[in-house]
Structures are given as structure tokens and as C-alpha cells.
Amino acid sequence: MSILTELQDLTGDMRGWRHHLHAHPETAFEEHQTSKLVAELLTSFGIEVHTGIARTGVVGVIHGKATGPWVGLRADMDALDVPEANDFAHRSQHPGKMHACGHDGHTAMLLGAAKYLAAKRDFAGTVAVIFQPAEENEGGGRVMVEEGLFERFPIESVYGLHNWPGLAAGHLAIRPGPQMASYDIFEITLEGQGAHAAMPHLGRDSMVAAAQLVTALQTIASRDANPLDAIVVSVTQIHGGDTWNVLPQQAVLRGTVRAFDASVQDLAERRIDEIAQGIAATFGIKARLRYERRYPPTINAREPARIAAAAATALVGADKVDLDPRPSMGAEDFAFLQQARPGAYIWLGAGPGQAGCMLHNPGYDFNDEILNIGAAYWVELVRQVLGGADA
Ligand SMILES: [Zn+2]
Ligand SMILES: [Zn+2]
């Protein structure tokens, strides 16, 4: 019997867990009820459970019938600060928060796979199911690594998965090398001299300088970086001024840089500062830069990427697996796990992705049709890494 058929029996469970999680979203490091539910379910499956890693993180340990290497499978559990626009029965009951990235589905699929693997244990080695907090913005994956994830559990390779609207439902996509970008943030404070708006010559205007700076920063991608290196520099906030007739003393610009290579991040950090200082000098004001590297790029190691692709192909057939998808400029804190151990991160197609079902959209809802395929991917991956039923 194929894994997909076998896992069909768990689809109802997974849908139930998923809808419960969707209705009760919790954000970064506050996933207390989610974490409790995950730990209780894993325990009920007969799995050894470790809680409190990175505050709300949970690791379940499933030993196979024979000994062998350890493999880590990771799901994220956190929701977003987005007010939900849906009105179906399982809509968010927590105002201002929702599962707009499908981490409810990721958690449910890994729970389904864990239940199946714990019942069978037909592999040679140990599976660690890793449920991490705070994937969005706060780097829960980094905190798990810092709190000894790989020292406490001798995991040799690690795998991640994300649902992907825009890719056909049930298709999978993975490539060796970069799959997702780095995520850096910057804040530039322009310090001028406030003045009456009718008498700009008596002050030093930070607003005109801010406007020039937004435009000039775009030349990092178009004139500083090698055209063959991907980079995005986006100014996402401008703050300054309180009223109609005052030129404010200060303007603050914030934004984000995405790239696939540390040398490109270095270039961006250096050029943002040089351009800010240059513009400030031009307008006779001062500039101060704060640049913070949040997430490294998600780089799939060659061998895990090959194994993940083999599992995907065995599961859904070569015609439904894209082995050379274009990387995304989005970011993923799974990158921290990949820095610690060889790993591979795959996209699971979630469907057409029309308006209303793209990630982080207030109308998004995880596609329940792919729960079965995601869970089956984990099971097939364990077979590929640790051997099959003969173990
Ligand atoms: Zn996500
Ligand atoms: Zn997200």
C-alpha cells in the first residue's frame, strides 16, 4: 500500500488539529497552548517528548526498530499579527492574530507523520520531530540552536518544509544551493535642524534629504551589485514630522535587504552607510545607520537536497517535482538549523494562490487538501534517510 493511501486514515485527525490551531493562533515565543497541545499529542502517540527548548519549542524523539543515524524534521508553530478577514467556522478566535502563513498546517502535518512513524518504527535510526516557535521575525530556530538542539539530540541532517501558494497543490519544489534569501533590516536616522516651513533657509531640512535617500538607495541594486547577484533593497517606513507648517528636526527611514550571499550583504551594509552619509553631507545634516542581520540565506546542502528530491519524486512522481525552482527573496529561519547541520528545505505546492490565499494575506487559509501529501513526504523522507520497512 502506498504511504499516501496509508496516511489517508490520519487526514481527519490532521484536519481537526489544523482547524483547532487555526482558531487559536499564538505569535512568537507565546505559543503556550500550541506547544502544550503538540506535547500532549506526541505523548499520546507513545513518543518521548522534550519541552521548553527556546521557551515554547518541543522535540519528540522516535526510535526505530534498529539503530542508525538521527534525522531532524522541523515544523514551525507560530502565527502572525494579522487580523483575519475570513468568516469560516475555524477562523481566529484571537483578535489581531491569525495563521496567515500556514504554520498551523505545518504543525498538523508533522504531527500526522509522527503518529504514523511512532506506530510503525520501521526504520534504522532515530527521528527527531522539531516543533519550533517564532519563525516569523524573531528567529525561534536560532534560539533552538543556541539552546543546544544539536547537542541534546545528535541529529546528523535536518529537513524543513513550507506550503507554497502559486505552486500547484501537491507538487513539490526543491533545489540544491540557495532556496530563500537572507533577511537584514536597517534604520537610518537623518538629523537636521527643525525650522518654520515658510523659512526653510533658517533650518536644515531632513525631509528633502529623506526623499533623495530613498531614491539613491535603489542604486545599490542597479549600480553597485553585480547584475548577476540578486539583491532587493526596500525602504518600508518613513517617519518624520507632526504638523503642516514645521520642517521636522529628524526623519527616520527603515527597510530591509534581501540577498543570497554574505558578500552581497556586506556590500549593501557598506553602501547604505556611504550613501546615507553622502546625502547627509549634501544637505548639511547628519546620518546614523543601524544595520542588523536577521536571517542568513536558506542554502540547501547538496546531499540532503538530493535525498529530499528523491523522496518527493518517489511520493508524487517526477512530473510533479520541480528540481530547479527559482529561489524566493523571502527568508526563513530554518537557515539557522542548516548552518548547524546539513539540511534541505522543500516547498509543497498549495494551489493557484489567487488574491486571498497568498502567504501573509488576511484571507489566507492553509489548503487542507495537501495535509496528506505533506505528512507522506515526511514519512517517505525518513524511509530514504533511514531505510524502509526491512530495517
Ligand atoms: Zn511561514
Ligand atoms: Zn510567513
Image (cartoon, rainbow, N blue to C red):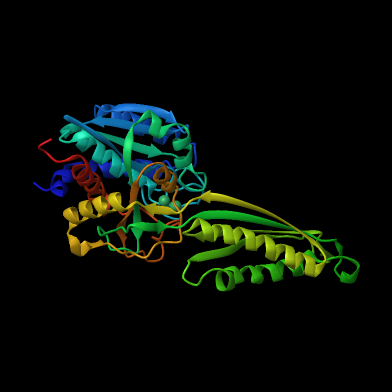
Residue 90 pos. (x, y %)? 36, 46
**Would you say 16 lies left or right of 296 here?**
left
Specify whether 359 is left or right of 344: right
Q: Nearer the viewer, residue 174 or 20?
A: 174
Q: Residue 200: give x, y in percent of width and height.
A: 87, 70
Left or right: where 246 falls relative to 323: right
Residue 322 in the figure: left or right of residue 141: left
- Which is more toward the observer, 22 or 124? 124
The residue located at (40%, 36%) in the rendering is 34
Instruction: Please tell me which residue is depicted at 23% across the width and 48% down the height of the picture.
Output: 377
Q: Look at the picture and state if 284 lies above or below 187.
A: below
Quarter of the figure with residue 115? top left
> Residue 208, position in %: x, y?
76, 70
Q: Residue at x 39, y 58 (%)?
A: 178
Whether residue 64 is situated above or below residue 240 in the rendered picture: above
Answer whether residue 87 is visible to the viewer in this image: no
Q: Nearer the viewer, residue 275 or 233?
A: 275
